[in-house]
Structure formats: structure tokens, C-alpha cells
Amino acid sequence: MEGERRLTLFEKLFFVEIIKGHMLTLRYLFSKPFTIQYPDEKRAPVPKSRGIHTFKLNPDGTERCNACGLCARICPSKCMKIAGEKIDNVRVAKDYDVDLTRCIFCGMCVDSCPKDALAMVEAYEFSAYDKNDLMLDKKKMHLYSSKVTA
Ligand code: SF4
Ligand code: SF4
């Protein structure tokens, strides 16, 4: 094949490439390991990493979201469903559902929100055996909302 280097007779006779491979393995055998013993050891997520979705709250604990639906419209996975209602003439989100089995964690919903009402926190340990457990609703999103700084 073009560009492929042919082995010299010396390299063929003395398995030079194999010896080089073993030397490399030996070098890494005595160096500091890159791996960690998860879940006993945890790695800190990189700053601004995108984990689970949550609401940013006003200082009085109310949600900022007015159910405008912009985040759902911009979502490339079309995995968000939002329904609004009016309470005391203020529009709020009645339902806010995110299907995490389809979410690609791109963060476009967070970036597009005109009310700065949404966040994705660093929590990443939310795997589940049941697909239904990966359907986020308002109740589940509020479990993480206190972690968000306004
Ligand atoms: S992170 Fe991306 S894919 Fe997931 S809900 Fe938001 S916009 Fe949709
Ligand atoms: S999170 Fe933001 S963009 Fe999405 S519905 Fe609420 S206010 Fe609108």
C-alpha cells in the first residue's frame, strides 16, 4: 500500500516493533494511573458542564419561567413539552417536561430562555433502569433548583 513503511530485514528478524510496543506498555505500567475507581472515587465535573435541567428561582422562591415555550421550539431533539396557565393574572408553567432519553444536553434551551429561568446543573448521576424515570417534570427539576445561584 502506498505510504506504508516496509520493515527492514533487521526489524523483521528481531521483532523491533513488538519490543517497542512492550517498552511503551512497561513505561505506562509504572506511571500514575489516569483512571479513577468510580463510584468510590468521583471526578469533579468541569466548570459549566451540562447535567440535569433545573429552574432558576427568584429570591422569593417563585419560578421565573412564564411558559413562553421558546426553549421547546428551539430544542433540536424536540424533547420538551411545556404547558402554561395564568395564576393571579401571571402566566406560569403548569407542566414542564423534558424527555432525557432524547435530550442531547446541548444547552440550547438554557441559552435561548429570555427570562433566564432555566439551568443545567453539574449533577450527572441520574441513570435509571426504567425509561420512565428519565422523564423530567417540574417536581424532579425542583430537586436541584436550590443549587442554582441567581
Ligand atoms: S439540552 Fe438541548 S436537547 Fe436537551 S432539552 Fe435542552 S435544547 Fe433540548
Ligand atoms: S424556560 Fe424560558 S424559554 Fe422555556 S418556557 Fe420558560 S421562560 Fe420560556
Image: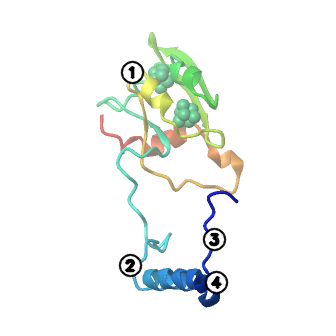
List the single residue furthest toward the top: 89
Label 4 vs 3, first from the N-terminus? 3
Rendering coords of residue 147 (x, y %): 36, 45
**Front one among 147 and 24:** 24
On the rendered structure, is 57 left or right of 103?
Answer: left
Q: Residue at x 60, y 78 (%)?
A: 8
Residue at image mark 2: 32
Q: Which secondary structure, mark 4?
A: helix
Q: Which mark is residue 115?
A: 1
Q: Amino acid at mark 2?
A: Lys
Q: Nearer the viewer, mark 1 or mark 3?
A: 3
The N terminus - image quarter:
bottom right
Q: Which mark is residue 146?
A: none
Label 2 vs 4, first from the N-terminus? 4
Q: Residue at x 63, y 46 (%)?
A: 134
Label 1 vs 3, first from the N-terminus? 3
Residue at image mark 3: 6
For marks 1 and 3, give the CA distance.
Answer: 64 Å
Q: Are marks 2 and 3 in contact (CB under 8 Å)?
A: no
Residue at image mark 4: 12
Q: Residue at x 40, y 19 (%)?
A: 114
Q: Which secondary structure, mark 1?
A: loop
On the rendered structure, is 135 left or right of 120?
Answer: right
Q: Are marks 1 and 3 in contact (CB under 8 Å)?
A: no
Q: Which secondary structure, mark 3?
A: loop
Rendering coords of residue 67 (x, y %): 51, 19
For marks 4 and 1, give the CA distance.
Answer: 68 Å
